[in-house]
Amino acid sequence: MADRSRRAPERVTHVVMTHLHADHVGWNTTWQDNRWVPTFPNARYYLPKDDFVFCDEGRNKEPGVVDVFGESFFDSVMPVVNEGLAEMMMPGQEIAGCLQVESAVGHSPGQVVFRARSHGEEAIFCGDILHSPLQIVLPQVNSGYCIRPDLARSTRLSFLNQAADSEALILPVHFGEPYCGYVRRQVPASPSNRPRGSNGTGCRTSMAPRACAPFRHTPHYRSRAGGYDRGSMSLPRDQQHAGSL
């Protein structure tokens, strides 16, 4: 990524992580001279404190725990800590003057999201609250890697409602193209006037255009009695993908 942006790793000043699962920490370090060293030697690395403590105490290795942290904790997290570059991060903080840290526990013990605001708009880097667009339709569905399943479900439900209320651009990590989108409530159709092609929930499946290139497609979900019920989301055929559930 640093190469693509034509910025040397030495110029990176902040590295943030929503959580410390193995697939989210790999860029932290680089193999040099037979050891793992920080990829960005002049940066501060912001680690979710509760995730770090969970692994540091070995609780990810306890019987019955799905260990999604694995050995990456030792090759991609601890080298940064040992070099004195780590900052333990908690909800309520602001990073780099632009990222608000908010709790999103469930998928991991300390997962957070980052909310950015600019010129009256906002975006949310929402980590692994969502793994697939299917979870917008069925928020009760977890991936197989949620350490605290019930918390993951309630976090997802709350997040979807907040995203709709704030009209924030959501940036999930695991979606395919167009990678980002907007969550919108829709008024459910009655059985008598349900349009052909509806998904049976009273909500037409759609991705509405919005003049916000390159993220032109807007996922929708509907609410009932002011809260999230069920929704629908579809991608153009050339952008459909399989979610990792």
Image (cartoon, rainbow, N blue to C red):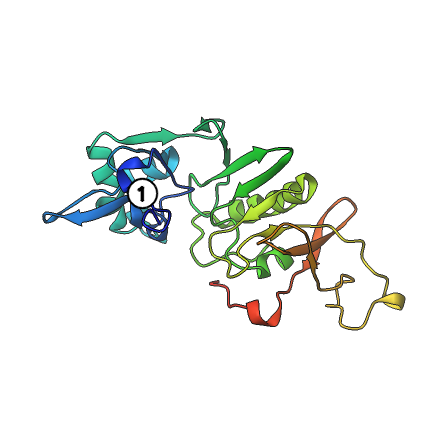
Dividing the picture into quarters, in which one does residue 140 lie?
bottom right
Q: Is residue 82 above or below residue 151?
A: above
Q: Secondary structure at mark 1?
A: helix
Whether residue 118 appears in this view of the structure is yes
Pinpoint residue 196: horizontal percent, then vertical percent. Answer: 80, 73
Q: Nearer the viewer, residue 60 or 34?
A: 34
Residue at image point 61% right, 65% down? 235
Q: Nearer the viewer, residue 175 or 143?
A: 175
Whether residue 57 appears in this view of the structure is no
Q: Is residue 68 above or below residue 50?
A: below
Position of 147 compared to 169: left or right?
left
Residue at far front of view: 6
Residue at image point 34% right, 33% down? 13
Residue at image point 37% right, 47% down? 5
Q: How many marks?
A: 1
Mark 1 is on which residue type?
A: Arg
Pinpoint residue 208: horizontal percent, then vertical percent. Answer: 70, 58
Q: Nearer the viewer, residue 223 or 124?
A: 124
Pinpoint residue 3: horizontal percent, then vertical percent. Answer: 32, 49
Residue at far left of view: 33
Pinpoint residue 190: horizontal percent, then vertical percent. Answer: 86, 62
Q: Which residue is mark 1?
A: 59
Position of 41 compared to 179: left or right?
left
Label 1 Cα neighbours within 10 Å, binned few <14 / some 14-19 / many ≥20: few
Dividing the picture into quarters, in which one does residue 163 lie?
top right
